Image (cartoon, helix red, strand yellow):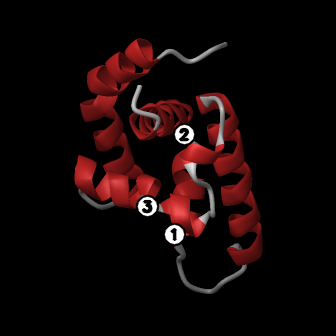
Amino acid sequence: MVMKKREVVKYVKENETAALERVSQILDKKTNLQSFNGIIGGKNATYEVDPLEYDTPESYIEAWMLSHQQRYNDEKHFSYSKSSHRVYNLLQDNFVKDFIENYLARTYFKKHGE
């Protein structure tokens, strides 16, 4: 399925409140959009994934998820919680995963000036 900017923006706007509530429950910590952006949006540099290097939001999301999985695999046995553990926990919830994918697509469209 090809992601379209209008649909992505609409999805994020309509689901933001419910997604942030679910994220807060999963992380056991009140999460607003700004902190969510730090958790997810701040990983572009950490995961070495630049939306401008991709031709489609789908390819950017795929690279982001792959990079996250590699980071998580490297850190999953750490005795303390790493950001990759928190992102992993969020991705286990289908609704939150869908929201993250749309949030990343929105980032892609913003960076591409679309």
Foreground: 46 or 70?
Answer: 46
Query: What is the quadrant of the C terminus in the image?
Result: top left
Secondary structure, mark 2, is: loop
**Residue at (69% x, 66% y) in the render:** 72
Of labels 2 and 3, the one closer to you: 3
Q: Is 110 situated above or below 51?
A: above
Q: Residues within 10 Å of mark 1 (few under 14, many from 20)?
A: some
Q: Residues within 10 Å of mark 2 (few under 14, many from 20)?
A: some
Q: Earlier in the sequence, mark 2 or mark 3?
A: 3
Which residue is labeled 2 in the image? 93
Secondary structure, mark 1, is: helix
Q: Furthest residue to the bottom? A: 79
Give the x, y percent position of residue 18.
30, 31
Q: Amino acid at mark 2?
A: Asp
Which residue is labeled 1 in the image? 83
Q: Residues within 10 Å of mark 3 (few under 14, many from 20)?
A: few
Left or right side of 97 for 54:
right
Mark 3 to mark 1 CA distance (whole Å):
10 Å
Q: Is 97 situated above or below 37?
A: above
**Residue at (39% x, 35% y) in the render:** 110
Give me the disc on residue 42: 3
Foreground: 92 or 37?
Answer: 37
**Residue at (66% x, 32% y) in the render:** 55
